[in-house]
Each structure stands twice: as C-alpha cells, then as structure tokens.
Amino acid sequence: QGGREANQVSDDYRYQDGNYEGYAPNDGYYRGGDEPAHEEDAQSDVTEGHDEDDEVYEGEYQGIPHPDDIKEKQKKRAPAVADEYRDRADLMAERMEDEEQLAHQYENIIEECGHGRFQWTLFFVLGLALMADGVEVFVVGFVLPSAEKDMCLSSSNKGMLGLIVYLGMMVGAVMLGGLADKLGRKKCLIISLAINAAFAFLSSFVQGYGFFLFCRLISGLGIGGSLPIVFAYFSEFLSREKRGEHLSWLCMFWMIGGIFASAMAWSIIPHYGWGFSMGTKYHFHSWRVFVLVCSLPCIASLVALKFMPESPRFLLEIGKHDEAWMILKQVHDTNMRAKGEPERVFTVSYIKTPKQVDEFIEIQSSTGTWYQRWLVRITTTFKQVWDNVLYCLTAQYRMNTLMLAVVWFTMALSYYGLIVWFPDMIRYLQEEAYESRVKIFDEEEVSHFTFNFTLENQIHRNGEYRNDKFIGMKFKEVRFEHSLFEECYFEDVTSSETFFENCTIISTVFHNTDLYEHKFINCRLINNTFLKQKEGCQLDFEEDNDFLIYLVSFLGSLSVLPGNIISALLMDKIGRIKMIGGSMLISAVCCFFLFFGNSESAMIGWQCLFCGASIAAWNALDVITVELYPTDKRATAFGILNGLCKFGAILGNSIFASFVGITKVVPILLASSALVGGGLLALRLPETREQVLM
C-alpha cells in the first residue's frame, strides 16, 4: 500500500507540465486554484536570469530526461519509420482523409483571402493563354486559301494541314495536362506557351510544306496543353461561390481569340504588299505576317505569367506547406490593400498537408552520370502520369469519367464538325452561283489575235486557235475542251483552276507561264516548246481570298457573347448539369432549322444561333470537369477529356466536310442526334456547385 501511495504522488508531480492538459488525479483530495500559481512562481525563481530562447551549448547540463519524455519522442518518430512497412491501401486511406480535411480548410482560407485584385490579375494573364488557344483553332482555316497557292498544295495536303493542329492539341492536352499534376501548374503552362510561341513564330518563316506542317503540329501540341492547365490553375484561387461564374467569364477569352483572328485576317491577308522577297526562292507574303501577329497573345501571356505564383493548392498537395502559406498570404495582402484594408492580418498559421505516398526515385550525383539521372527522373515522372491516367478509371471515378467522355466527344463531334461545315457550305453555295453564270463558247475559230486581258468563268469547246498570242493575261476558272492550238504563243500567263482537256496543241511556245503538265489532261502535245516556267503557285490576293469567310468566322465568334454572359450569370444559380443538358438540347433544335438554310445569309444566321446556344454547354463542361476530380488528378483528367474532344473534332471535320455538296441530311442528323444523346446523358452527372474543391 505504501508503494502505491508513493507512485500516486510521483504521478501527481509527473503531469504538472502544461503539455498534459486536462489531467485530474483521482485521489479525492481538493486542490485549490492558487496551487498552480505557486508552482509558476517557483519555476520563475529557479529560472530567474535565464532566457528560454538562449542557445543551449554543447556540454551544458540539461538534466536527466524523464522516461515518459523518451517514450513520447519515440512515439512521434514511430509513424515515419513504420510507413515503409505499412500497406499502401492504409496510406492512401490516410491521405484521402487528410485531403478531405485540407479541402474544407482551404475553402475557408480562400474565403478569408477574398476575391479581388489578385484574382483579376490572374484572370487576364490566363485569359491571354486561353485567347491564344482560340486563335490557334482559326489560324489554319484563314491562311489555307493563301497557303495552298503559295505552297502549291493538293486537296489531300490541304486536308492534312487543317487536321494537324487538332492532332497536336490532342497529344498536348493529355501529355502536358498530366505533367501539370506532377511538376506544377505554372511551370507546365510556361512550357506549353513557350512551345506554342516558338513554333508559331517559326512557322511564319518556313517555305516548305513539310516543315510548315511540322511547326503547326508542335505549335498545336503546345497550345493544346494550356487549356487543361489554365482551368485547373485558376479554379484553385477561387472560392466555391465564385468558381462557376468566374470560370465562365474566363471562357470569354476563347471568343475574343476568334474575334482577334478574324479581324487580323480580314485586315492583313488581303494586303499582298505587306511582305518581302529574297531572290526568287524566298517569299514572305501577307498571310505569313498574319501568322506572326497571331502569336502575340501567347507571347504576352508567357511574359505576364512570370510574375504570377504557383498554385498554393498544388504546393500543399506535394507537401510544400511554407511556400503555399506565403503565396496565400500574398493573395490575402494584395486583395486587402486593394480594398483599402491593409491592416487586416492573415490569421492562418498552419495548413493541413496530405500524407505523401509517392516516392520519387532519384540517383545521387555520386552514383550515376547526368544522363542516367535524367533518364530515371523522366521515366519516373511519366510513370506517375500514367498512374494518374489509370486512377481516373478506378471504381471511384470510372462512371463519371466515362459519362464525361461521351458528353465531351458528342459535343466536339457536332460543334467542330458544323463549324467547318458552315464555311464549306457557304463556299459551295457561292460556287453554285458562280457556275450558274458560266459562259460557254462552241466551235469558235480565232486566228492572228492577241489576248491580253483576263478570261474568267468560261468553257471553250471544239474551238480552233491558229497563230494567236496570249500575252500578260490571266485565266481564272477557264476550261478548253476538244480544241486545237496551232503555232500559238503563250507568254507571262497566270492561271487559276484552268485546264486543257482532250486538246491538240501543235508547234506552240510557252514562255514564263504556270501552265504545268498536270493542267493538260489527255492532250496531244506535238513539237511544243516550254521556256522558263514560273516557279511556285501564283497568288492574287485581291481575287482569290474570300472576304465573306472572314466575316462568317467573325460573326460566329461574336455570336457566343450573349451565351457567355448568360452562362456566367446563371452557372451558380441553376447548376452545371442543367446548363449542359439545356444548352445541348437547344443546340440540337437549332440544327434542324439548317434544313431551311438554302442561302448564304440563312446559313450565317443559323450558324450564329447554333454557336450562341452551344457555348453555355462548353462553359459548364469546363467547370464540372475541374470540380469532379481531386487536385492531384485535376489537370490529368481535364487533359484526357480535352484530348478526346480534339479527337472528336478531327472526326467531325473529316465526316462533315465529305458531305458538302452531296447532302445536308447526314451532317444535320448526325449533329442533332449526338447533341441529344450527350445532353440527356449529361443530366445523369453529379451536381458540383455546392461542393468544395478536393
């Protein structure tokens, strides 16, 4: 009994320290409130003249450590050692619990930081990057009529040039989106924009078709990676109440990019003199100036991004607590100063960081060469990216990922397919009207006559031309069929869509012309002379470029403005799901009215209505994709879905373009059914407007 009492007294003294808060000995004795104060006085007497912050020098007497203190320190060290032997599932479960706590704490921190100058600055910087993406989509379509003449492109080459940008975007979205979850939002966005700016700039100077195609491919790869990063990056600086609205406002920069590209094409490309030549081989025409100007938004965003911080949500995810805290304090202080409240103090002192599970394999400098270290580093990074891709298809996210994939694909198939189909249909209607005005000449006989004027939109059949001269003239859409040319002279002749079919040409001289071999179809050429043929394709900008196509793209881009405003104002009120479903179903109805579009003005009107109705679905898709996935998978998931979207764009462009001039029924029914199916499926997705960003 004496031993137990001694232990009891010992325990009473043992837990006097403030670290054992809440301990109450159960010996039944009353302890007054002043007793701790006496102890405090005693402690201060003992430590009088000693500063607690004084450095403890080596060898100084520090007292004998208490056994319980030793146990406590061992207990704190134990988890770090034991993690190596714990099951990965247990570690992941602990990490997920940490992430849930972090999500709610981070939401409160962002609300404390407020929404102000910092977010608006980042809004415009990332908006320029999104604008560059919008420009990239339109560039090739605008330069194609000029580039095909400048580079002598065949129909298959033109089709490849139109699709190569989407192919690059598809690869870039998946690759750079995945890397952004491992290397950081800011770093990967800078890489993405730098690739786009460098190769877009370079493509304006290259002369060969193959090199130009390669530059546009890599340029598309760069800008394709920017889209998933931009939305993931910006969303992590927004509170729940602001996220849907301000991500929708951000989408307006894609529209601004389309308007910018249309306006620049309209004002630059038709001016043939805005360029230069170096000898006979190198020509820098005005369409190349247009390509150069279109890289400016990307360059501006790249420069401005240097002054922006990394996403603090990403830094917390990888365990960099102090860096994240400093950035959040910067956001808070910037916004408070702008509001005129610089005295407001950032009250957050500690932020929860998730348990770090992934281990990055590294070779030390002493045990490997530099290229071995880089090889291991790159291999490990891409393995982690691949693991993230597979994680999006695990049981927890599989259904959402598959449904989103279908909605993204159906939306892209119909939207991008129709966006290409509209201009092609307008061109077809123009060609029909042009062909209806064709002049036909039968069995004309002309001799000793000099042609020095332009022949346009004519068909000459069974004619005979003897001792005639064709000097300093242009053929445009002219066809000679079953005609005879004898002892004629062609000099300084330029032709566009001009062919000789089943003709007989005898003792004729061709000097400085572009009448190449492929323009003589099933012709008999007897004793003719070809001298100094023109090199390259001859380009007449004033005649060959269609101003109406620029106007159509400009109006199509401008027409999404009302849809952007409505979606931004209603995104947080009616929800993402209703926005996607309603917008896609309304767009499907607009498609049916295309059956009545038998004129250019009608097609332009229905295009504007379709673009304006469908933009709300695009905005809501961007928002819900950001909100459905956790921070360490967000850019990866967005990249996968956006890559699938670009694949749908490639299919849509190919399928819809093949039916131009054949039938309107297939494109309209295909687009409508895709939109209806995708819209109905979207209604089964979970609503995310009330949830915090995981």
Image (tube, rainbow, N blue to C red):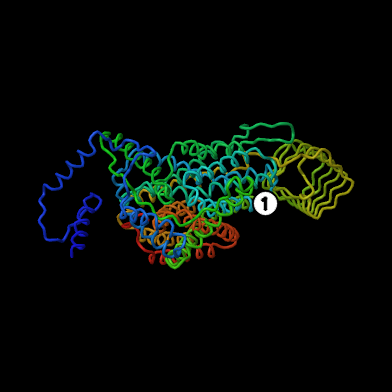
Quarter of the C terminus within the rendering: bottom left
Quarter where residue 47 is shown: top left
Residue 54 spot, x, y in % from top left: 32, 35
Residue 501 spot, x, y in % from top left: 77, 53
Residue 558 visible in the current orientation:
yes
Quarter where residue 96 is shown: bottom left
Identify the secondary structure beneath mark 1.
helix
Quarter of the N terminus within the rendering: bottom left
Crowd band around label 1 with a 10 angstrom C-alpha radius: few (<14), some (14–19), many (20+): some
For residue 652, above or below residue 399: above
Along the line of sight, the residue nearer the viewer: 233 or 151: 233
Q: Residue furthest front?
A: 2
Q: Residue furthest right?
A: 527
Residue visible at 35% across and 61% down in the picture: 687
Q: Amino acid at mark 1?
A: Asn
Along the line of sight, the residue nearer the viewer: 606 or 214: 214
Residue 464 spot, x, y in % from top left: 81, 48
Along the line of sight, the residue nearer the viewer: 555 or 397: 397
Number of residue marks: 1
* Residue at image mark 1: 157
Residue 251 visible in the current orientation:
no
Residue 354 spot, x, y in % from top left: 39, 54
